Image (spheres, rainbow, N blue to C red):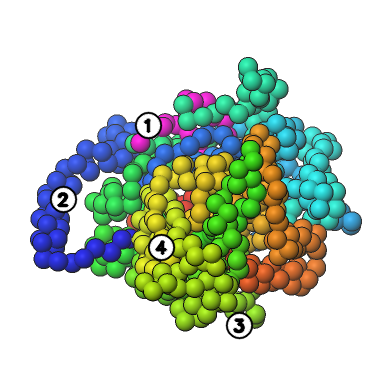
Amino acid sequence: MVSFSRDFSRDFQRYWLLVLLAIVLPISLAACNPQGLRSSAAQVSQIVETQIGDPKTFNFALSNESPNVFGYIYEGLITENALTGELEPALAESWKLSDNKQQVEVTLREGLKWSDGQPLTVDDVVFSYQEIYLNPKIPTDIQDILRIGKQRKLPTVKKLDDRRVEFTTPEPFAPFLRNSTGLPVMPAHILRETVTQKDQQGNPLFLSTWGTGTDPKKIVCNGPYMLDQYVTSQRVVFKRNPYYWRKDAQGNQQPYIERVVWSLVENQNTSLLQFRSGGQDAIEPLRPEDFPLLKQEEKRGKFTLHVGGPRPGTTFISFNLNQGRRNGKPIVDPIKARWFNNVKFRQAVAYAIDRQKIVNNIYRGVGVLVNSPIISQSPYFLPPEKGLRVYNFEPDKARELLKAGGFTYNSQGQLLDAEGNRVRFTLMTNAENTFRVAITGQIKQDLAKLGMQVDLNPINFNLMIDKLDNTFDWDCYLILMGGGGRDPHSGTNVWSTEGSSHNFNPPSLPGKPPIEGRVIADWEAEISRLYIEGSQELDETKRKAIYAKTQQLSQEYLPWIPLANGLLLAAVRDRVQPIQYPELGDALWNLRELRTVD
């Protein structure tokens, strides 16, 4: 969060603002409190949680944003236990791997049904993969994690009988079970026609199917819940799926809680206020600066605070290393391109940023330094004590690197390149995230001490993504990427030179203007090659050595400059039981097993 000066006038204004909120807030929240959805005529068990922003689609294959509804309404064949990281059966009853490690035979459970009561069969599995996830006419990031080997071939899927399906990979592929068989199974009886029929532009109707304008009740799913209501900028309501397959040891239908309500808010301040007023049962993620405040209210508010590990993913800055052209024009200013592609420049920036200060001041001490694009919870993470390079705050070393890289200083202490150009660039991040905006402010100050001028550009998230994915009109950006995957292969779309999220030096992608004269650095190509090799290696010791090398290369050449992450924090009312908080977060990961005790 941005730090403000604490002069008397500001404190005086804030005091009266808090007094006013104390009077007005209970009235306003009572008027919009989702708990009010309960009626005296029909009490149902429910929990209410906040989500910042609206869902962007109800179509899983087209989703790459958060929040999204799919964890509640869909399941795949296999799932990952959030506490142990072990693979467990979901829609699949069992699976087995062939001797040559290239076939996975999956057996479905008997009696599976969709939320509309129709049978869920092997045909749905084959349809989901063959017609959606592996369909070249349906652009989705999912295909990046399914591509295998140097040829980037896709797996195949076929029906063996009414309950068995077989996946075949063109070569041994270690991450297949964890990264591929957990994809949601989609309903063929509803969606098949949308894949085969085309719009006026010749695109499958599927690409415009199940947007957020669709009646939520028409979304057919297989998870513990189904969509019941969506009111833009207000709420999403889920109700229990009566055809969900799971039952407890006593034969009772799960989930136990009948309804889940998302209260949609614009920002984390509103989320906190609603939780403190008693209107919400859970708040996650919780900001570090809110932790001490809620700790004081924990007993009185009848809730429990939960602390996990570092937030999955990597918070980093990245420079635009693109040296190509579009329509004959350089994508990046050639002067800046020379700076950004100078490894000594990037290393100097890394040494100049006081990352511990980010942890202390912005994350309020409830955070950790990040040194790798692979999460610390992964068995493939390489810790610094085993050879991972770390960039501590060493501004003198940063200046030495800049001088060695051909940079000089003028009489005003401004940093100049070898041709006398002043070093000045723009750093963008998404304006909605106050932490990231605050971090860019500190980076600006830190790099100013090196003589660099950094112009900050906090912009709308969707506009930033358009710059990264389409126009490439950017110098440097700050974001968190990487997700929560324990297997590094989930990052292939970032580290493959042909990956759709290889933003620091993107490839030409279908449907977009081609990039001419693209230059791929040797280290960049080597990381890409190692990610392929790592996916092919089935020996765990050798796999760890391969991914250790990728981390060493990324820290040496710094396509990402890792910064710091906050710890995962959540607050949940004691009426919701039993909460088992995983290191990777998600307080409600076992929602189907939770009960409310009122």
Q: Which mark is residue 385?
A: 3
The answer for how far apart the CA atoms under marks 2 and 1 are is 26 Å
Q: Quadrant of residue 443?
A: bottom left
Distance of label 1 from label 4 (alpha carbons)? 45 Å
**Residue type pointed to by label 2:** Leu
Mark 2 is surrounded, within 10 Å at the Cα level, by few (under 14), some (14 to 19) or many (20 or more) other residues, namely: some
Label 3 with label 4: CB-CB less than 8 Å: no
Query: What's the mark number on residue 21?
Result: 2
In the rendered view, tell whether residue 61 sits above or below residue 86. Answer: above
Amino acid identity at mark 1: Val
SS at circle 1: strand
Which mark lies nearer to you, 1 or 3? 3
Q: Find residue 262 and report its horizontal and vertical position in percent.
A: 39, 42
Return the disc, 3 or 2, that comes first in the chain's sequence: 2
Q: Which region is colored magenta? A: 214-233
Q: How many marks?
A: 4
Q: CA distance from mark 1 to mark 3?
A: 51 Å
Residue at left offset 41%, top offset 63%? 453
Q: Which residue is mark 1?
A: 231
The Cα atoms of the two marked residues, 4 and 2, are separated by 40 Å
Please identify the quarter of the rendering in which residue 437 is found.
bottom left
Q: Is residue 455 left or right of residue 245?
A: left
Tag shown at residue 453? 4
